[in-house]
Image (tube, rainbow, N blue to C red):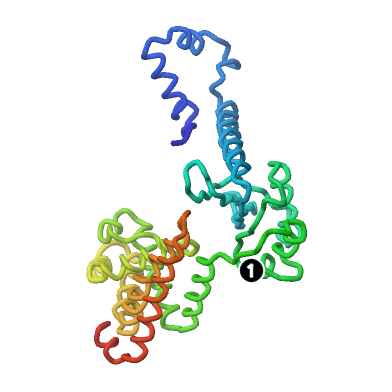
Amino acid sequence: MPLRGKQTDEGVLLDLLNLRIDSGDDKLRSHLEKCRRNAVYTSPKIQNDFINLCGDVIKENIITEIKKATFYVVLADETADIAGKEQLSIGVLFYDERKVIIREEFVGFIELKSQNASSIAEAIDIFLISNNLPAEDCVGFGFDGCSTIACRVSGVQAILIKKYYRASYVHCSSHKLILVVNDANAVPEIRNTVATVKDTINFFRESSTRWKYAPNLTRMCETRWSEKYKSIRLFSQNFPEVVRALEKLSTVGNYAMRKSAYQLHSAITKPEFILSLQTIARYSAVLEPVANVLQSKSVDMIAVREHIRGILDMLSIDRKEADKLANYLQ
């Protein structure tokens, strides 16, 4: 829950203070009512200080647990905040002996001065040093596979492993799966179908009036692939309802809405779109659990292997019996 609200006179902190006053805390009531306005200690700045202090305590506790574990793995990925600033999110994977589990904990963001390999490697190194995490206890780095990160000669992992000599670089398995699936976008029909699904979902979500006609669709996220699989699956399951909704909206409302609804209705009722959608939905149904397992904190690689075997068997059968598959999709 957010400590601060949208307005200066609302939020969890102020609600808790009012709860204490209602429970009979007269000293707190007197402080808030009679003290000088610059000494109330409920301003947005003070509340931000509270948030930062809470974050420091949580981070310190996590770092303490990591040090007890002896060995740890660093996980990092680049992202941009709401202001467009490039940041590096840092997570740590370690074994908790007390709880007898493998834990994956987020420990902070680092603002990047530059996105080249040396700057990213330096940022990670400084972060580990500042938190007193020994270099000799680091046994792995988990990143994505872009050239800046993965290059064996001058990539981030190559620079870090010179110092963290016990560490191995591991390309994120979920990211590998995404790269393989992305290759399917080389097929024009598949690429166009995914784009049309996204446009249709956005058309409904842009207006509460339209949304009433198709309530069971979720926004398609380009980066979270488990959400993308779910979005396509729901679109396929609710396809007849979507068609009827677009047909209805193409005859009501203003000109712009009727035009967009008609164009989308024409696009999603084409045979090649329907066949492509059913094909994507069929394989998304088996890819979704794999993506979820690979992103879980405690990855069960045996379960992943069984999922992958199932996918390979399905692909093999579908290729051998293409005519039967075509009849099934129809």
Q: Residue at x 27, y 65 (%)?
A: 249
Q: Is residue 313 left or right of residue 251?
A: right
Please tell me how many numbered marks the rendered image carries.
Answer: 1
Find residue 154 and report its image quarter. bottom right
Find residue 163 and report its image quarter. bottom right
Q: Quadrant of the C terminus?
A: bottom left
Other residues around mark 1 within 10 Å, as few (<14) / some (14–19) / many (≥20):
few
- Residue 128, x across and y down, in percent: 69, 47
* Residue tagged 1: 146
Q: Quadrant of the N terminus?
A: top left
- Residue 134, x across and y down, in percent: 71, 47
Find residue 153 and report its image quarter. bottom right
Q: Is residue 26 above or below residue 244?
A: above
Callout 1, which amino acid? Cys
Front one among 52 and 260: 52
Front one among 254 and 72: 72
Q: Residue at x 41, y 61 (%)?
A: 227
Q: Residue at x 45, y 78 (%)?
A: 191
Q: Residue at x 55, y 28 (%)?
A: 47
- Residue 226, x across and y down, in percent: 42, 63
- Residue 3, x across and y down, in percent: 48, 32
Q: Secondary structure at mark 1?
A: loop
Front one among 64 and 267: 64
Front one among 197 and 327: 327
Q: Is residue 282 above or below residue 163?
A: below
Q: Is residue 295 left or right of residue 244?
A: right
Q: Is residue 84 above or below residue 149?
A: above
